[in-house]
Image (spheres, helix red, strand yellow):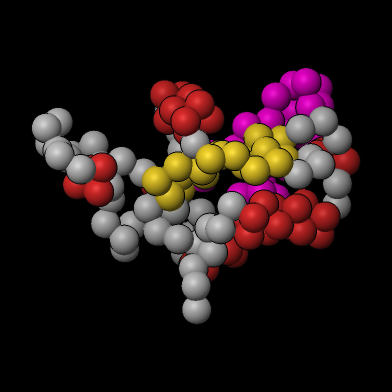
């Protein structure tokens, strides 16, 4: 995989505070093996006294970001958790051009998710993205 095919770190949610904010206040969708929480991303550079929420939102050209949570309750083996994380990241990388801009997504794996084949993971994640209305309209 070349560097232009990888999902850049700037497209990943890496701070615990962001994970908690999205999980607590974001819109949620659930499937058999995953939970998706999504929230429009707020512009940290916006003035504190912004009068409207739209004043604090990021511009439309800013791509969506993803965060993935897979706890040891899902599977005790790190190799399996990491494989699932790589699979979800690859699905997001493939789909990100079709997703709405300026969104933060957190995907939480539930029990049994590490047992799924790639195609099943892809189907469930795409279904969640569609149910959350995160795809751009053509």
Residue 78, above or below 118: above
Residue 95 colored magenta? no
Q: Which residue lies furthest to the front in this view?
A: 51
Residue at left offset 53%, top offset 40%: 27
Q: Is residue 121 at all visible to an observer of this figure?
A: yes
Measuring from the top left, give residue 138's x and y in whole percent.
Answer: 50, 78
Residue 86, above or below 24: below
Residue at left offset 65%, top offset 43%: 29
Residue at left offset 15%, top offset 39%: 51
Residue 2 horizontal side relative to residue 114, left or right = left
Q: Is residue 11 at all visible to an observer of this figure?
A: no
Residue 132, above or below 97: above
Residue 103 horizontal side relative to residue 112, left or right = left
**Quarter assignment of residue 30:** top right
Q: Quadrant of the N terminus?
A: bottom right
Measuring from the top left, give residue 7's x and y in whole percent.
Answer: 51, 54
Residue 70 colored magenta? yes
Measuring from the top left, give residue 69's x and y in whole percent.
Answer: 62, 32
Q: Give the range drawn in magenta.
A: 66-91
């Amino acid at each position: 995989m070349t560097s232009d095919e990888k999902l850049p770190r700037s497209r990943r949610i890496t701070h615990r505070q962001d994970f908690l904010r999205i999980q607590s206040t974001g819109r949620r969708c659930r499937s058999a093996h995953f939970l998706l929480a999504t929230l429009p991303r707020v512009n940290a550079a916006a003035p504190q006294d912004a009068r409207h929420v739209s004043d604090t939102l990021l511009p439309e050209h800013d791509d969506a970001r993803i965060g993935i949570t897979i706890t040891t309750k899902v599977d005790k083996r790190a190799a399996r958790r990491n494989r699932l994380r790589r699979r979800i990241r690859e699905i997001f990388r493939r789909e990100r051009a079709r997703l709405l801009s300026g969104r933060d997504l957190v995907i939480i794996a539930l029990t049994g998710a590490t047992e799924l084949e790639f195609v099943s993971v892809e189907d469930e994640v795409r279904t969640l993205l569609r149910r959350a209305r995160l795809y751009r309209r053509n």
